[in-house]
Amino acid sequence: MRRPYLAVALAAAAVALLGGCARGDDWSQPRPQPSAIGELEAGFVAPSATPVPESTITPAPGSWSGVRPGEGYRVVLLSAGTGRPTKTLVAAVRQWAKDADVDLRTETAADDTDLVPAINRALALRPDLVVSAGDDLVDPLAMITPNHLAQRFLVVGAELAEPTGNVTAVDWTGASFRGEGLGASSEYDAATFTSARCAAAVRAGTAAVVSGVTGVVVWMDDYA
């Protein structure tokens, strides 16, 4: 007669254990932002000066390879659009997160009416970093990011026209979409969004952010 009660007790214990695992993944719990592991090499920024917000830096190839986020780093991949450039960027972010053992979640804008709500959903998760992929997000981010200066953003394959210090961008000739009526540059070329360049852009950009080099444009013309 005691077996049913035992089964109920075991089931309750299993649920409690599963609940404990879920709580461990709860991003709403405050905790210090993990420190970067490793350091940028000297060729990442010019040794003579600290980059100022809105400046452009051209890091030496591979000068970011020794840097990765600390354990438990939380990233939201925010994306919009179904074109090949966006898909290539999304794949690069996912691969980087896997290689760096980053805690990654995703928010995808369903359509133009969902751009701002998607950004707000990403912010509600309270990540260490929001990584944006897709030109359609540029104008909404330009409107929202100045009101969330404590939140770090990384825009890959585009840039904001007037970014605040919490927004870092990675760009190159052939990308350079800036929004706010400026649109894409005359040199825009979707073919420049290669897997190799997007992978390098994501790694260089995230290395800059976790190392405290923020609010700048990281220029990536050296990758094809």
Image (tube, rainbow, N blue to C red):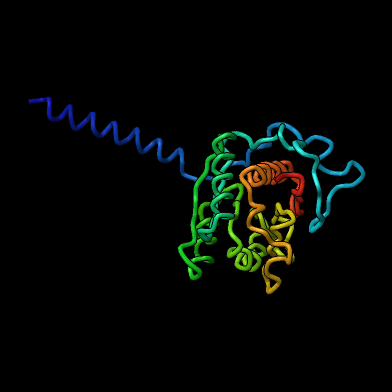
Q: Residue at x 82, y 56 (%)?
A: 55
Left or right position of 87 against 37? left
Number of callouts in the render? 0
Quadrant where the N terminus lies? top left
From the viewer's side, name the closer residue of 154 and 87: 87
Could you say where residue 165 lies in the image, as x and y percent from the top left? 74, 57
Farthest-out residue, bottom = 181
Is residue 7 among what the camera can see?
yes
Q: Is residue 62 above or below residue 106?
A: above
Farthest-out residue, right = 48
Could you say where residue 180 lies in the image, as x and y percent from the top left? 68, 72
Q: Residue at x 54, y 58 (%)?
A: 83
The quarter holding residue 135 reads bottom right
Q: Is residue 217 above or below residue 35?
A: below
Q: Is residue 112 above or below residue 206?
A: below
Could you say where residue 216 lies in the image, as x and y percent from the top left? 76, 54
Is residue 153 among what the camera can see?
no
